[in-house]
Image: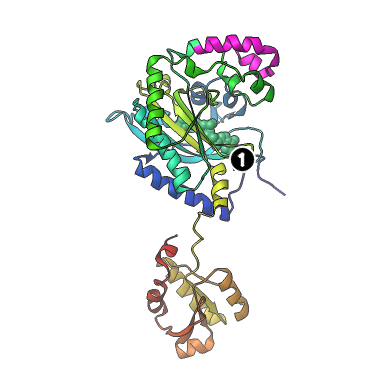
Amino acid sequence: MLQLIKGFKDILPEEARVWRHIEQMTADTFADFGFAEIRPPVMEKATLFEKSIGEDTDIVEKEMYTFADRTGQLITLRPEATASVVRAYIQHKLYAGDPVQKLYTIGPMFRRERPQKGRYRQFHQINAEALGISAPYIDAQLILMLMTLLKDRLSVSDAGLHLNSLGCRQCRPDFKTALIGFLKSKQPDLCADCARRMDRNPLRVLDCKVEGCRQATAEAPAMTDFLCSDCREHFDTVTGLLNDMGLAYELDKRMVRGLDYYTRTTFEVQTGKLGAQSAIAGGGRYDELVKMLDGPDQPAVGFAIGFERLAEIVANEDVVPEARGVDLFIAALGDQSREKAFGWMCDLNRSGFRAEMAFEDRSLKSQMKLADRLHAARTLIVGDAELESGIAPLRDMTTKDQQEIAIDNLTEAIKPLLTNTDKQQRNR
Ligand code: HAM
């Protein structure tokens, strides 16, 4: 049997219902905060990601799906969306009228990681990117938006915010020097990857998941001890604003993130509900990236939420409304009634009602069972006798009350009755 590719996943109807709910909540919440949607493509030139994410990151070194197309051009299935959003900002000169752009996008990403629960090779992210603002207010607003969506709107009650600053071009070199010095003293305890990357990209060592590396770097110097006065002030303002908003956070001096473009504020959201893959979202500032990709010198800050991880929690929280039930089931007995029923059903479907019927010849008992399974609010029963008399019974499936209804002009006669179905329920 043909099966899907390892690390890829089908989103089956019951899950898709949860996904839709999350997408809706995200669109509503992000609109409240002034974010507009953008939809970049899933493939880009490989160089876009190599340049932005960094050559010696895990993503670029070993996880990208990069291949030559038929002309030999190297293209990559995007491992993240930030680089694409920045590319679009530059390419379409979205900064021309007003450099400030608050954008979000939801879609699939691809990383060839080792698959496990909560970690896929095609996964989805909810991305938010605010370009053109250097003031720390936007860092705080973005974090507030993230926590509002997760905690208030989607009930991820234990979502914990972890915060760090990675400094800037001015102050990071001193930190790197100190860190390399420290790492040299620990070299024998580091894994082969870390020993190799240590000089070029020492921050990656702090992000290594290998237990030996984690232990060896427990006492490593912290970037926050090296911040220049501007970065210090920026970070203190962000934490001050979060305090004012009553948003709890934990300072995490080890958090360096897995991508190279970050500057200043970085953050992750962790949850205890997912087992090993506890990071549900991550993000931060990337003030140099727009310029590095040949755009204007504009700062930016953003985050991405792991959709599968979020969906798993939301599915267990019982916050997703029930699927909308069927407004009317038409139980038809005999060929002639079935043909009539089909016409009524189609007419009601086109008018926005959920009408259903059995397409094959079935006993009344089996059709009533089907109506129950579909949670039909009402069932109309038609056979030859009803066609003859022009009157058919309409049963309320909850109360079991039955009324007679004229079927000459059935759909017009029945619509006002069906509109009584709970409005909210019908809109789902
Ligand atoms: P990231 O930390 O690489 O950041 O990914 C963000 C989130 O995506 C993670 O916290 C996790 O929930 C989810 N995720 C990552 N890899 C996988 C995977 N293999 N399977 C399932 N979920 C996964 C970024 O991608 C940055 N672009 C975030 C950002 C936006 N920074 C600034 N703007």
Question: Closest to the observer: 226 or 352?
Answer: 226
Residue placed under numbered mark 1 in the picture? 118
Left or right, 166 with reference to 57: left
Q: Percent from the top left, x then y, of residue 351?
A: 40, 67
Asked if residue 358 shows in the view, the reply is no
Q: Which residues are magenta?
A: 175-199
Q: Percent from the top left, x then y, of residue 403?
A: 45, 84
Q: Percent from the top left, x then y, of residue 2?
A: 69, 47
Question: Closest to the observer: 213 or 341?
Answer: 213
Residue at 57 percent of width and 55 percent of height: 14
Q: Quadrant of the C terminus?
A: bottom left
Q: Percent from the top left, x then y, of residue 32?
A: 35, 44
| Ligand 1 is within 8 Å of the C-beta of the residue at disc 1 | yes
Instruction: Considering the whole magenta stretch, tell me its main secondary structure.
Output: helix
How was the colour assigned to the protein in this rendering? rainbow
Residue 114, image quadrant: top right
